[in-house]
Amino acid sequence: MGQVAPVHRKVVLSPQEAVAGIHNGAVLLVGGWGGIGIPEELILAVKSLAPRNLTIVTNNCGMGNPGDVGELFGAGLISKVIATFPVHSGAVDFRNQVARGEVEVELTPQGTLAERLRSAGAGLGGFYTPTGVGTLLGNDKESRVIQGKNYIFEESLPGDFAIIKADQADAMGNLRFRYAARSFNPLMAMAAKRTIVQVDELVEVGSIAPDDVHLPGIFVDQIYVSEDHK
Amino acid sequence: MSLSAGWDKYEQARKVIALLKPGSYVNLGIGMPGLVADQMDENLGIYLHCENGLIGYRGLYPDETIDIDVIDAASKPVGLINGASVVAHDVSFAIARGGRLDTAVLGAFQVSEFGDLANWMSPNAVIAGVGGAMDLAVGARQVIAMMKHVDKVGEPKIVRSCTYPLTARNVVDYIVSEYAVIAISEEGLIVEELAEGVTEEFLESVTAAPLKFQVSTSS
């Protein structure tokens, strides 16, 4: 018996095609941290697709850079955001929309956000964390003493879609990230029902050694190779 | 005495470094703590950890080429030491909460005499960012608040009880301001070092909590 050739059906030709399924009211996980690891072309494609009433999950709410998540606020697509550090001075549209009461904000500590995504990807309902105990972000949450220490319960945070950025992919969707551009990207891929990745480079299947894969293709549905790097 | 007395921010960073143990893992918060990386002697073998998953970063060398994917918590370009590693956000915060992080050096709006930390939200803010502050504050074995001694209008930031929203209770071990190094212990606030020219009376006048002085003369 010969080996079955892998079916290379994950690569799409345009960012528009990649994000075409994102619907009104979707929960959209958007990768990136600060100014890096951001799937800029996918964000711009979501902006032109213009689904309404999105809930987005993101570390930041834009820094005023082209292609960052601020574009989606600018286009008025967002009704709720779950973020850790939304207050950058460049997040102008976000600030204005919050001031006008158009966007609901759920602030979550950064480690809690990471773990809410991780636990969603792992099929868990949530977890107890010491982070936020006795603070405005923890006071209304279920609390429990475990092994003598105070914890609060945080729910997992699954998404309908994740748009993420990676450095390299093969056609099976195996990914490698670059330095701090990894951050939330693999966690969001695991937490979403459907994951779309923008990569800088598409490499031959098998050229990433199994031990060197940062995120296996089982978590990746579609791959778009960035125009700047084709 | 004049308010301009005291350490400059670089000297203040070196006072923080003096509290760090060789071979320890340290996270530096946004703002003033970022200066610690630049003042750090690499030979101390201190590993800087960043929320973004870098373990073992350092300040850039003069004329070093910038890599946009290698940044600190303030998105400032940094370099990596030999032996650095990179993890995703879940593992980065497992390090913070899981008891592996020796020290977090954080900025502060207010610190109470019991070590309560308020550093993420001013009371009248409509929106605020919390980032990793709460995870780092509860997780690190030692928390050093590196801050100005008083706020922009001259109000003391070291207080009996925080009026700003809390980041975490009972977590700060040391305050390093431009005037003094202050330990927070069961016995309260212990001044361990005073900047040259700063008197006990002056320090008390800019601090809204009781101080005890155990200043070593050798410094």
Image (spheres, rainbow, N blue to C red):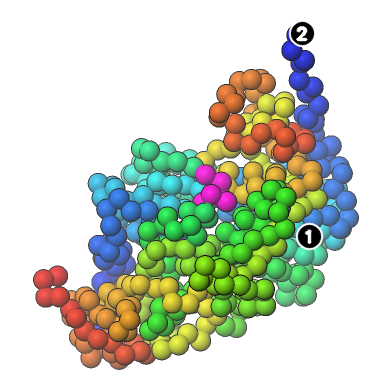
A43 is higher (above) or lower (below) than B128: above
Residue at position x 78%, y 60% in the image: A55
Residue at position x 74%, y 12% in the image: A3
Neighbours of disc 1 within 10 Å: few (<14), some (14-19), many (20+): many
- Residue A38 visible in the picture: no
State the residue position of label 2: A1
Q: Quadrant of the C terminus of chain A?
A: top right
Q: What main secondary structure does the magenta stretch of the protein show?
A: helix
Residue at position x 30%, y 50% in the image: B23
Between B142 and B52, the one nearer to me in the picture: B142
Task: Give percent across and percent down for residue A79.
Answer: 80, 65
B186 is higher (above) or lower (below) than B140: below
The outermost residue toward the top is A1
Left or right, residue A63 beside residue A18? left
Residue B79 sits in which quadrant? top left
A116 is higher (above) or lower (below) than A227: below
Per the rendered image, the range of residues in magenta is B87-92
Task: Give percent across and percent down for residue B193.
Answer: 21, 75
For marks 2 and 1, the one nearer the N-term is 2
Between B143 and A97, the one nearer to me in the picture: B143
Task: Give percent across and percent down for residue A62.
Answer: 65, 58
Residue at position x 48%, y 67% in the image: B138
State the residue position of label 1: A55
Give the residue type that dot 2 points to: Met
